[in-house]
Image (spheres, coloured by chain):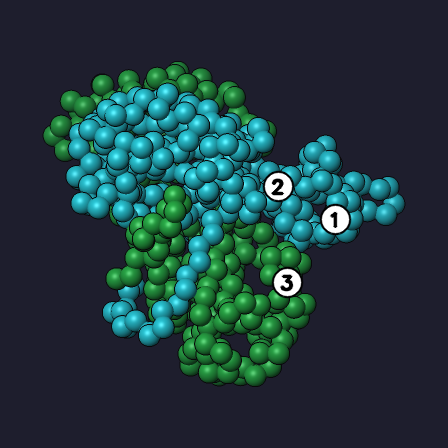
Amino acid sequence: MASTTARRTNKSKQVRGDGFRARRAGRGVARYYLLYEHLSGALNDGTIPAGGALPSEPELVTRYKLSRTTVRRALARLEEEGRIVRRRGSGTFARQNRKPALLLLNLDDFFEDLPALFTQSAKTLLRFEMGPVPTSLRELQPHLGSRALILQRLHRHHGTPYALTTAYIPEKLGKKIGKDALTRSSIITALDQIAPRISRTEYTTSAVAADAVAAKRLDVALGTPLLRTRAVLSAGRAQVHAVLESLCRPDRFNVRVALERGSSRGSKPHWRLKRS
Amino acid sequence: MTRATNAGIGVTRYLQVYTVLSQALAEGDIAAGEALPSEPSLVRQYGVSRTTVRRALARLAAERCIVRRRGSGTFARDKVVRPSSARQIASIIDNPRSVVTNTTVRLLEFKSMPVPDFLQRDWPDFGPTVLTIRRVRYVNQDPVVLVTSYVPEDVGRLLTPKRLGNGTITAALNQLGLHSASLEQEASAVAADPLTAKHLAFSVGSPVLKLRCLERDSRGRILRYANYLYRPDRYELHTVVERQRHPPRRYPSRT
């Protein structure tokens, strides 16, 4: 940490040059948040390296024409997140970026890994009932039908909720599945036992804002971005066996895909999942 | 205890309610012509004040997403001509041919700089200097994605803004005989920061699909690291996995 003071002057200059103006706040955005985002970006991309000093509070106040309270709030949030450390008398410094404890789902071992990952973590069964399929899912996957067995679970890791998963199993298949079959094995294993083997999964990954239900379950603020993955499990054309929707907290859980180039088909590159 | 540390705080409550409702409308969870929950029930559902709910509804009304009929309630507008769906746009953008003909690009940055810490930390073989290319890609004049690419110096030396043109960086590298053989991709979700929001014409704090992607050639040399920020209403990521005939070996558990 001896080098931190030496770095201080030139690094704080770099933060200055990039056109951040707190006054151009969008509608409905708190000013402190803009400063927080700005500093957070500088910490992420290494403009302020680990161990490097942040500009002092008075400097931030004059540079961005913000009140001291606003500046303090932004710094307090960064500190709370463990990204900076404030040392009395010497200033504020970027902390060594901890590798976040992310759970990673590898799509390539979905059939093996997802059940393992989701069965090992603590989970709570929230719903197990026949019910209507939401409109947006029905549009996405007409073969699912209008009613399905709905199985909703909340997954926790070290006590923190990270995923809210909902499985929709077409009524005809759903009727054959007992609650205990699903607690003993994964959904895929349970389905494989009563229907032709699932041969294909199609994923759609997107980002959504946490609605009231998801926010409450996942213990996040309303509107927090969540990673949504919808997986359509099928055993051949039009034979949809289940649609699994997971809403994940991106600070806890990301989805990873490893691809390798397969044999070229014409001019279009053809990628396939890399199998370990 | 986790609440205070989550993104989304810092965006006012009305904007949170607005974001959630506008998503429900866009996705059809509240169908065209259907009634929205009443003001008092929105107040209960979201745990916010009536003023907050009204502000969110006022913005949706101003954006012509809803209509408010005195005495009968608030309704989703009848089916307006929907812009191309996220799926359609994805098929344009992910196809190496149509991406050239059917999209446009704005170059924001093209410059050499010292390798950022986060790259150096995760991939020490990146080298000390990188070419940073930041671009926004549009479909029908609507911004879809903000892409920041980092290319190692020796590869970057071969690229010029002109050589990139409208095409993808991968295509430009291909033309130079540099082919990616493996690709690691990680998907996450983030709140749009002010810069991203500006370039994607989106509100600050809205959810954005973030993809990080590392390409290597057949010898394992890094060709490019890229950070994609997509508007989720205009793009979604599709992946198809065919199951292997024989079940693969069991993996040791990962926690």
Amino acid at circle 2: Ser
The chain identifier of the residue carrying mark 2 reads B
Residue carrying label 3 = A142
Give the side of residue B53 with respect to residue A114, left or right.
right
Image vertical order of residue B192 relative to residue A188, above or below: above
Q: Are marks 1 and 3 on the same chain?
A: no
Q: Which mark is residue B32?
A: 1
Mark 1 to mark 3 CA distance (whole Å): 19 Å
| Residue for badge 2 | B84
Q: Quadrant of residue B62?
A: top right
Q: Earlier in the sequence, mark 1 or mark 2?
A: 1
For image coordinates 50% across by 28% down, the residue present is B104
Q: Secondary structure at mark 3?
A: helix
Q: Position of residue B117 (x, y in %)?
A: 24, 34
Q: Colour of chain B?
A: cyan
Q: Is residue B172 left or right of residue B194?
A: left
User: Which hue is chain A drawn in?
Assistant: green
Type of amino acid at the residue the image marks with label 3: Pro
